[in-house]
Image (spheres, helix red, strand yellow):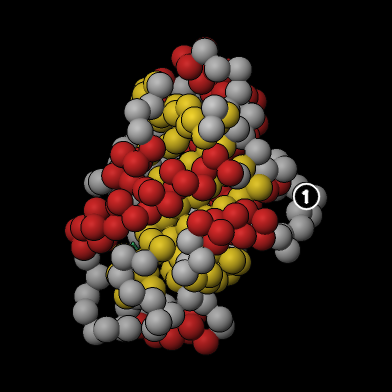
Amino acid sequence: MDNSKIIEALDRDPLAQAQSAADQIAKITKKLSHQVALVLGSGWISAADSLGKPTHEFSATELPGFINPTVAGHGGKIRSYDLNTDGKITSVLVFLGRTHFYEGLGMNAVCHSVRTAVKAGCKSIVLTNAAGGINRDYKVGQPVLIRDHISLTAASPLSGANFVDLTDLYSKDLRNIVKQSDSQLSEGVYVHWRGPTYETPAEINMMRTVGADLVGMSTVPEAIAAHALGAKVLAISLVTNAAAGVTGEKLDHAEVIAAGKAAATRIGDLLAKVLPKL
Ligand code: 8IG
């Protein structure tokens, strides 16, 4: 199917498309349900190696509603893992790469992975991303738990009189579980910036002034969509560059990918440890 037909169907009934995609995942994996979903953003994909061997891997485009991701360094693959902790199996659905708002395909395309995951049974959704560090204490290669967000796109994946509370969007319970594995982890406020341009130094100063620690082009719509369906959300940024004006250096996508590769083992081991506990 061509992309415009896929988007049309998604926009007509996003939850029906998510249900169809979830049914197809159950068919492919022969698993009635998954418990946890993990969305791996740029910089995080090689961290999947720490999870061991997946039971299944397939292209997202085999499922209804998915469009091929276009950005270099992103996957477009979905994997199913059975993580074994003391004999207890946790089935984890892993999305390698995501659709971004800046691609212009609309919010339903951006949120289709997490909606599919919730329909597949996932009660906890882990969202990862690469982000620019606004907080001057952050170092490149450092993971940061997202505690709250500021949406500078102000674009919502929801429509209608659907007044969803967001006071515990980034579940405190899930953050505490992660901090039991790594007590050194910082928490921060993430700004959603539409992109695809990075910010100007003046915009980064504005963000710092209003209380932001991190900035990126993803995660916020997916977190809202997952929360609206009743799932708990954990979100982790990998700081892959200092935001514009922080160091005086220019921003470069290749640098982002390299910083992700360098941190892959640390963040992969963290994920492998915490996923079964969520
Ligand atoms: I990686 O500095 C990454 N993604 N908006 N700004 C924005 N997104 C980003 C940045 C950044 N670094």
Q: Position of residue 133 (x, y in %)?
A: 39, 73
- Where residue 72 appears, as percent x and y from the top left, is 24, 46
Residue at horizontal 25 percent and vertical 61 percent from the top: 259
Residue 90 visible somewhere in the drawing? yes
Q: Is residue 262 left or right of residue 115?
A: left
Q: Quadrant of the N terminus?
A: top left
Q: In which quadrant of this rendering is ligand 1 seen?
A: bottom left
Q: Residue at x 48, y 61 (%)?
A: 182
Number of residues whose C-alpha sits closer than 10 Å to that of mark 1, classed few (under 14), some (14–19) or many (20 or more): few
Residue 276, quarter of the rendered image? top right
Classify 150 as above or below 45.
below
Count of numbered badges drawn on the protein: 1
Residue at x 41% of width, y 63% of height = 143
**Residue nearest the viewer, comparing 126 with 97:** 126
Measured as percent of width and height from the top left, residue 103 is found at: 39, 48
Query: What is the x, y in percent for residue 257?
Result: 24, 55
Q: Residue furthest front?
A: 86
Image: 93 above or below 229:
above
Residue for badge 1:
162
| Amino acid at pointer 1 | Asn
Name the side, left or right, on which 97 lies relative to 19: left
Left or right of 4 in this view: 261: left
Give the residue drawn at x 59%, y 66%: 147
Q: Nearer the viewer, residue 259 or 247?
A: 259
Q: Is residue 112 visible from the viewing direction of this image?
A: no
Judge left or right: residue 143 versus residue 230.
left
Which quarter of the rendering shows the C terminus?
top right
